[in-house]
Image (spheres, rainbow, N blue to C red):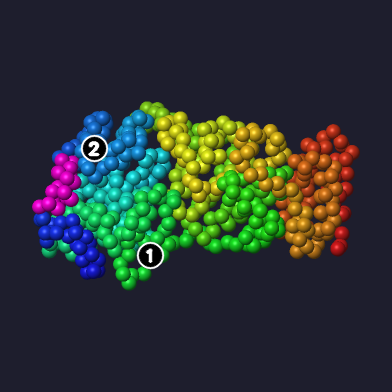
Amino acid sequence: MIAAYSIQELLDLIKEKYPEWDSFQDSLFVAEAVAPLRRISDKARQTLRKADFRDLLAAADYEQLWNRLEQLGRQSSHMWTGHQANSDLAILYEVRERGSMWTLLEQLRALVYEKRPSPDRLQSFSDYCEENNLTNKWAFATFYMTLLRPHAEILIKPRVARWFLQFMGLGEIYTPKPTARMYERYKKTCHGLLAELKPMGAQDMIDIHGLITTAYQVSKTRVGGLKLEAQIELDRPLALREERPLYTVQGADPPKVEVENPEMTLKDVAEQIGWSEDATEEWVKAVKRKKQAIFYGPPGTGKTFVAAQLARYLVSGGDGLIKTVQFHPAYDYTDFIEGIRPETAPDGRLTYRNRQGVFTTFCQQAAERSGPSVLIIDEINRANLAQVLGECMYLLEYREDTIELASGRSFAIPPQLFILGTMNTADRSIALIDHALRRRFAFIHLPPNYDLLERKIALQPAVNGAELVAQLQKINRLIGDPHFYLGISYFLVEDLEILLPQIWQMEIEPYLEELFSHQPDVLEQLRWDKISPHFTENK
């Protein structure tokens, strides 16, 4: 049930634009707020009937069906049809360009005609868009749902919907992309409004959409309603918006912002990674200043663990995301940014389409969050970085800019996105990395942390930690090159006394055999049977 004062405030907004308004039959209100969408709905129910949809798909007359959909969209004032790549109909042009119209048309048929709850159908359509890297907008899916079933479904235009949810005290359920949860609540609220306003002549969801849209438009200039600063906030890019109510009812509690990531202090991070709080603070400052950093050092120094803990700190207390990818020699631009991928149609035809890569997809997701997000690139130096990043190298230095990708799409890195890489210097020296790329990252050196190792081993009395550290330091002096030092992570395990022989013989000795292949006498002294007595002496 909708609160009476909420309905009255909505009607007050309507009457500011239409002073004589007393019912949904008001001629001016109908002409401006209702009739345009109703005309398109009437036409859609003639040209997109269930039987027509089925027959055209069966006959593989995809072009005819596509043309009908586009024509309805372009004829409606409710759909923004400017630049194709950014319009509400962008998905239509994407599938046509990729030669995969039939997949979208089949999904649309299921969206508007399958006998399942509409929120579930909408979620399936949204998942299809995300899985296939297609533009996924509220307006597109709900436009055709509303045209064909105006008594049941409601058109969602994001700005209007977000304002209305805030108005009704439901702002926390807003999502920038279609979800079953938001649609179910939004639709339920609109149907509740329809039930309350039927005595005033409201017939269906087209009437309710006209009411909400008009109220939103009036609220932009109404003193005491949606304030100017709130409207400016709503018009800002989603990634830069603050999570605060845009419209409040006097006396109502403001909606609470859901915090997904637990709070984490700098002291917490330092304790987790085993480095000093001062060192940890310097690393955080470097990351925040540069926006991207690489932790580099020899094998086994905890680079990936440190990056993961710093990422948790950066997103703590907010709604940001953390994603980890690992580079390898075969990783390229098409995996990370975008590229053409083959796709087999049900009829066996092979089609090719452009798909977003890991980075562009994650940037899109991060832009929808208000807090910082972090991308961790493990083993960043194992791929050809210039080849993987392509024109995005420019954006790493000029974060405020936008570039055009090879596909013609505009792309920018969200300002609140951090990139943390890890680099094993035994695989490739930092000196071999392109200088232009090096200046775009802060480089943080992680040598073996002997103090941390000794503190950890102190918890396992059966192993002589001081002697283990001494032998490790001796081996690293013999190695000579800091890029190839033996790290401490091999020994940071429980039951080290039991596992140490296996660790040494199966992990450390093969590594030393490679380093001392031309010094067999030195290698022999580092075999387990020669060195083990040092580690098990009593403290």
Assign a secondary structure to mark 2.
helix
Give the extent of the magenta segment: 27-44
Q: Quadrant of the N terminus?
A: bottom left
Would you say 138 lies left or right of 505 here? Answer: left
Q: Position of residue 7 (x, y in %)?
A: 22, 65
- Which numbered circle lies on residue 74? 2
Most common SS among magenta residues: helix
Name the outermost residue toward the right.
Answer: 521
The total of numbered circles placed on residues is: 2
- Mark 2 neighbour density, 10 Å: few (under 14) some (14–19) many (20 or more): some
Task: Please name the residue shown 80% across and 37% down the image.
Answer: 515
3D distance between C-alphas at marks 1 and 2: 37 Å
Residue 317 appearing in the image:
yes
Q: Position of residue 325 (x, y in %)?
A: 56, 43
> Between 37 and 41, which is closer to the camera in this rendering?
37
Would you say 462 lies left or right of 223 here? Answer: right
Q: Position of residue 353 (x, y in %)?
A: 41, 31
Task: Please name the residue shown 36% across and 44% down the image.
Answer: 136
Q: Amino acid at mark 1?
A: Pro
Residue named by callout 1: 255
Q: Amino acid at mark 2?
A: Arg
